[in-house]
Amino acid sequence: DRSPSRGLGDVYKRQQLMSSKFRQFLQQEIAISSKDLSVVFNNQRQPNDPIPMLLWQYGFISSNQLQLIWDWLDAQVCL
């Protein structure tokens, strides 16, 4: 018997893990500084604003890097 709140906690834990993995990918593979990431994460207007687009709009990544990020995110959905 699973309570709804327990299910929401599991979703939250997965989101936190994804956020951690995503940050790690951005810093290690795309070479985004933690300072640049903080700027973007702190300036999201909505919680669901697409981080890759914000990174590109702020000029922190190139269009090639943007494509690498989309490819990585697509691969995570398929796991």
Image: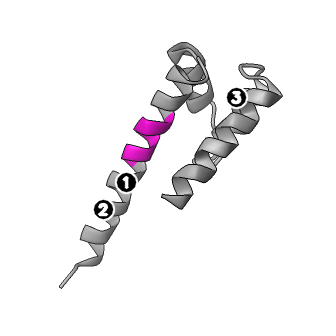
Quarter of the image that includes the N terminus: bottom left
Residue linked to disc 1? 14
Q: Is residue 61 above or below residue 49?
A: above
In the rendered image, is residue 45 in sight?
no
Q: Earlier in the sequence, mark 3 or mark 2?
A: 2
Relative depth, front residue between 30 and 3? 30
Badge 1 amino acid? Arg
Q: Specify the segment rendered in magenta.
A: 16-22
Q: Earlier in the sequence, mark 3 or mark 1?
A: 1
Q: Which mark is residue 52?
A: none
Residue linked to disc 3? 55
Classify mark 3: helix, strand or loop: helix
Residue 40 colored magenta?
no
Q: Is residue 53 above or below residue 75?
A: above
Badge 3 amino acid? Leu
Residue linked to disc 2? 10
